[in-house]
Structure formats: C-alpha cells, structure tokens
Amino acid sequence: MSLNPTRVLTCIQCGKCTGSCPEAGKTPFNIRMLIRKKQFQYAIEEGIPWYCTSCGACTLRCPRDVKPSEVIIDIRSALVEDGQIPLSLQKALENTFVQKNPWGLSRNKRGAWTEKLDFEIPHVSETKEKRLLFVCCIQAYDPRCMVIPANVAQILKRADFEFGILGEEEACCGNEIRRIGESGLFEELQEENITNFKEYGVKEIITLSPHCMNVFKKEYGDTGINVSHYTEVVWELIKNSALDIKGQYEKKVIYHDPCFLGKQNGIFDQPRNILSAINGLQLLEFSRSRETSLCCEGGGGRMFFETEIAYQRNADVRVLEAAERGADVITTACPFCLMNLDDPATEKGQVVKELSEILMEVL
Amino acid sequence: MNILVFTKRVPATQEEELRILGDGKEVDLSKLPFKVNDWDNYAVEEAVRIAEKTGGTVTAISIGDAESDEVLRRAIAMGVKDGFLIEVEKVLQDPYARAMLAYNFLKKENIPFDTILTGVQSEDDQFASVGGILAALLKVPYSSMVIGIDNVDKDHLVLRRELEGGLQERTKVMLPCVLSIQSGINEPRYVSIMGVRKASKVERKVFKAKDYEESMSSLIEVVKWVYPPKKGGATMLSGELEEICKQILGIIKEKGVYQ
C-alpha cells in the first residue's frame, strides 16, 4: 500500500501543479498531463516521470489533495518493478543495496569525515541524552559536503550540546530511494535504521540534510523520536545564549530555501534567524523565496540522473539572480542545493557556502 | 532452448581496503558486503533474453554457501525459471575443482541443456577458466569472451567474441555448448527488492557438494595471500593550493604533456 494515498480521480485539471512545477515549460515534463493520463489509464512515456525533482510544490498547491508528487512515485514504482529505469539511477539503487549509499563507496568509511576533527565523537549509545547526529550519505562521502558534519559537530561541541553518531552502522535514510520508486529498498533501509535507533535507545535525531529530516519525520512511521534539522537546534542554542557569535561578517548574503526544509516542512525562519544574528551580515532575499522558492533540481533522484535534453538549470537562474541582487555569498542549508548551486556559481565567479561554513567563520 | 546459467555471490571489494589475516592465511571478509558477480549478471540477462526470444527455459546454478541463495533469487527475479544451489562447506577456489563439481552435478542429476552460460570470470578469484574446463569435461564446444549472440538456430549459435584492438570475431558454435559471457553484452535489467522478495516464493533446490565430489581435486593450492609490492615513482606535492598547481604545471610541461 502506498505510504501517502493519492487521489488521482479527484483531479479537476486546474493546472496549478504545472504552474508551480520547476520543470514545466522547459522540459517535456507536464505534471497535469501525467495526472490526466493516469485518470484515463493511458500509457505514459517511460522517460518522462524521471524529470520530477520531488520538490513538492504541486502537492502543496493542489486544491483537491491529489498529491501529484506522490502520483509520480507510484508511476516510478511501476517502472522500477518492470526494470525500466535510467542506468545511472539503477546504479544508485544497486549501490545503496550493497553499500547503503548511492555512490557505492565503502560503508566502512562512512565515519571518515570525523578523522579531521581534534576531538572524538561518541557512539550515540554512549551518550547520556541519546541524541543522534544523523550524517547520511552525501555528507559522509562527498569531499565538498564532508565539511558540513565536521562544522556542525564543532558548533554543537562549542555549545556543550551532547550528541553521538552511528558511524558505519548508519544506512542511507532512503528519502531519495523512496522517491525514485524503490519502495522495497526503502523499507529495508527504514527497517535497518529503526532497528539501530531502538537498539541504542535514540530519543532525538538531528539531521544535516533536510531530506533525511523529511523522511524521518513523515515517512518512518511513529518512532517516538524527536527529529529536527540542525538549523533549528543551532538557532535555539543562539537564542539561549549557549552559542556566542563573536565575529563580524561584513557581506551581503542571499539565502536559498531548500524545498525539503522550507516548502515541505515549514522551516523558513530558523536559518534566516541564524544569519540575522551575525553582526555585519546583510541578509538578502530571492524574488522567489520561502514557499515559492525555486527548486535546485537535486531532489527525487535527480542528483544521480542527468536528463537527455539540455536546458537552463534552475541553479543557474538562482546564481544569476543572486548576482543581480548584489549578493557576495549565496547560502543554503541543504547539501543537494549546495552541490547544484556550486557549479554555476564557480563558473560565474560567485561563492556558495553552506550555512555552517559561514557560522564557523564567526563563532 | 534450455539454458543453464552459473551465478556466483562475491564480496564487493571495489571500494574496500582489504586486510590479510593470520600471516597470509586468509583475507578478512567479515565486514564486506556481498553482491552478484558482475559478469554473471550479464550472463543471466543474456540467458533470459534468449529464452524470451526463442522460448525454452533458464535455470540458474550457484556453487557456494547457503547465502548464495541470494543470487539465485535475484536471477529468478530477472526471469530465470528456477535455481539450484550446490552448497559447499568450505570456499572452493580452484577452477578445475569448481568445474568438476559442476560436471559431476550435471551428469549425476541428468540435467538437460542446450547451452551453458557463465560469466567470463568472477570478481573474487579471477581465474576466468571454469567455463572452459567445464566445456572440456562435457566434451562440448566452448566460446569465451562472448560479446554478442546474433543468431540462435536449432543446432547452432552465431555469436561474436571480443578481441583486442577493437575487433570482434564472428563464430558459429554447434549446440550443445558452453559460453563465457563478457560484460557489456547487454544492459542487465534492474531487479527490485520487491521482485527479489516475490522470487523467494519460487523453489530453489539445494544439493550438497559432497555428493558430487568424485574425481574432484584441486590442482592449484593457495600458498599465501600477499599485498602487491610497493613501487616507487609517486611524488607527493605539498604546500598551498596555488603552489601545488604551479608544481603540477611544471611537471607536466617537463614531461612534455603540455607545451
């Protein structure tokens, strides 16, 4: 049974979904049309559903609760069961099955990011608070993103905020795996992680990626564990004076709302509050921000899949707008957004920083 | 056409730093995940495609421990009809012993076949010879490095073998025969976890290797596991990024790579 039952037959074809879709108009992806085809059980061209970035804008705006983004997952699931999926996604799934991360890197090296720290992070079972810092795949392995867990660990330590990790026992959270349509693999990852959470008595999870937070909060069922994104925790620490921001940051910083943090989970203010608490920092906004933030196109498996047609990427649009608005730095609080924004920004001589990178400069 | 396809469960070593234990007596596999041998994945896909096109059935066979049932279920999820596990009590590396075990099993159980497919080699042992030895024991034709099967006829196959220098060799092979399948012959389909779970309902027969060990002996003995000798030649650059870049540029200019 589907995790979030859809209501395809209630669709009135109003087109609000396509109107808000970050892929509409410039790719062959038309979500309204796909829902129509589902209503009439018409065949769907197999390449089309893979354009969806799972940003959730369609589901948020749908007046009939059709949940178009969940319909896409259903369509993809049928393709997965048929074995008809793009090769790069197939590799990501097979890698996740074997090594519990989409890149197929050694599970034994999942804790390698801790090696550069000058202190040891305990296993979560050894902590008093049973508070888990969930690292997940891209931050554990990608050289650009490995800095995020290291930064957040140092920030939490500075605030005397106890936490632990799972190290190599951690498995991919499965948020993207479920959205690619591999429900069986998602269930296996979910079961493995929940078994660990229970065995070690985890009471609280702090995630670095909004994608992990989303899946733990909404799709792991009732685990009784309090889940939050690190920006929520860090803002509380700043508010309670447990973290003292000493440095100045005399720069204009523009904040990009990640879809899974913002529009899908309503966390808009905490990252902005953190940035606003930094002396000298001037916070800028994109024309499309908060609920209407433009998706970076990294969700729903798109981090592992290159589309066949070339078109102007949303990250490119974002970087151009940041320059127009006079931003010195683009910041965000999601590793996928960071990776997608980094490429066009580097090309245009702009700087992208994950929020924790800015914090490390001023603490 | 009745096809038998051999499939092996191997450790996923690609991203690992392997450790040798007990003065070269064994390799530490305790923390490694396992997977289907890559070449066998192509062989299973090819077998299923032939059966889909020409009719007939495909049976997957695995020589290994009880855990090897995993690769049989995977093969069934890909479209294979059923699976046989020849369960060994200890790891069998010697290719002659493996081929002899397979030969004895096929003869004793009187398993009919028109074609036997194996992967070119296994990722763990890399002897690339079980298929050839099995064909010799069965006294049937053998073709290695098969990169394409162009025609399936009643009494023969027309296939392509991969050669060096970008060449391929088209050959006609009479049936029954043994083929070792090269990776890249096809694009193996994705096997979903749900598919593998469903495949669990299809019966896999388990046979004990000790019942088929007649004349089976190892011709090769592993004396010791060793690391490759360390070679010199690598230069580690240090300093600031800009300085390192200058050094690299200097080196590639010096070597004539960049003028």
Image (cartoon, coloured by chain):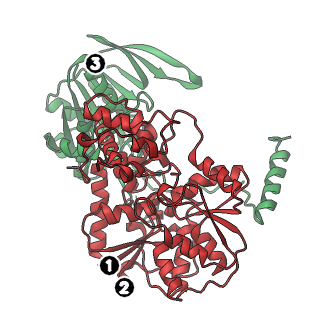
Q: Chain of mark 2?
A: A
Which residue in the structure is indicated by mark 3?
B53
Q: Is residue B3 above or below residue A270?
A: above
Q: Secondary structure at mark 1?
A: loop
Q: Chain of mark 3?
A: B
Spot occupied by residue A80 in the image (x, y as percentages of width and height): 32, 40
The kind of residue tagged 3 is Lys
Q: Determine which residue is flagged by label 2.
A: A129
Q: Of discs 2 and 3, which sits in the foreground?
A: 2
For the point 62% across and 83% down, the residue is A245
Q: Please report, as a chain letter, where disc 1 is located.
A: A
Task: Left or right? Give the position of A319 relative to A127.
Answer: right
Q: CA distance from mark 2 to mark 1?
A: 7 Å
Determine the secondary structure under disc 2: loop
Tell me how far mark 3 sits from mark 1, CA to CA.
55 Å
Confirm whether circles 3 and 1 share one chain: no
Quadrant including the C terminus of chain B? top right
Q: Secondary structure at mark 3?
A: helix
Chain identifier, colour red: A
Q: Do discs 2 and 3 share a chain?
A: no
Question: Residue B113 or A140: which is nearer the viewer?
Answer: A140
Does A248 sit above or below residue B222?
below
**Callout 2 crowding tier (Cα within 10 Å): few <14, some 14–19, many ≥20:** some
Question: Disc 2, disc 1: CB below 8 Å?
Answer: yes
Q: Neighbour class for label 3 at 10 Å: few (<14), some, many (≥20)?
A: few
Say whether marks 3 and 1 touch (CB < 8 Å). no
The dot on residue A203 is: 1
Tint of chain B: green
